């Protein structure tokens, strides 16, 4: 298994606090898949307004965390070193469970197709084995 710490993730991704949404990578194979985690705490900046008294991680940030996890799989390929992955589209997106402080969000992204700078991945976020969100993400490397 290939794992990455936060410092190693920052060598691959350009994201930084408060927008780096992956704490560590448990396993990945460049160009194929990545599995990472986001440990959700009350200290997240977005909880100040989403929602006061009933904190819920915004769905768009769950999708962004999945995209960052997928970017690890794509940007860790030698030919993509130093590049940035951009969203090209989000399809078949569904939110199934709220993510709240104390949750350990498991982020899985499997690359389905990769042709040149474009690709598509299957993304699933779970908490305790239950699906919180899933989507098909299209990306462009530039």
Image (tube, grey):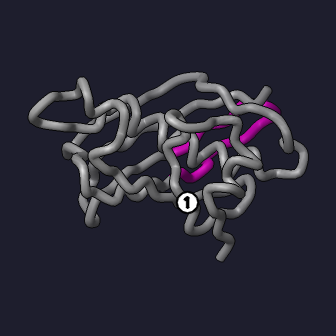
Does residue 111 show up magenta in the picture?
A: yes
Residue drawn at x 85%, y 44% as measured from the top left? 81
Circle 1 residue: 24
For the record, the magenta segment spans 109-122
Q: Which residue lies furthest to the left in this view?
A: 53
In which quadrant is the N terminus drawn?
bottom right
Residue 17 as seen in the image, left or right of residue 50: right
- Disc 1 element: strand
- Magenta span dominant secondary structure: strand
User: How many dots with numbers?
Assistant: 1
Residue 42 as seen in the image, left or right of residue 15: left
Identify whether 32 is placed above or below 89: below
In which quadrant is the C terminus drawn?
top right
Residue drawn at x 74%, y 57% as measured from the top left? 30
**Residue 13 place in picture, x, y as percent:** 69, 42
Which one is in front, 50 or 65? 50
Which one is in front, 38 or 139? 38
**Residue 121 place in picture, x, y as percent:** 56, 43
């Amino acid at each position: 298994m290939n794992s990455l710490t936060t410092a190693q993730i920052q060598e691959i991704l350009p994201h930084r606090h408060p927008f780096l949404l992956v704490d560590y990578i448990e396993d990945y194979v460049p160009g194929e898949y990545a599995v990472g985690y986001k440990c959700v705490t009350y200290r997240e900046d977005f909880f100040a307004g989403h929602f006061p008294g009933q904190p819920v991680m915004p769905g768009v940030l769950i999708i962004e965390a999945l995209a960052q996890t997928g970017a690890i799989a794509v940007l860790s390929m030698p030919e993509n070193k130093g590049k940035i992955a951009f969203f090209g589209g989000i399809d078949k997106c569904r939110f199934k469970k709220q993510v709240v402080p104390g949750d350990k969000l498991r982020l899985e992204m499997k690359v389905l197709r990769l042709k040149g700078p474009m690709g598509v991945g299957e993304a699933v976020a779970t908490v305790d084995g239950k699906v919180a969100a899933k989507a098909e993400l299209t990306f462009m490397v530039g």
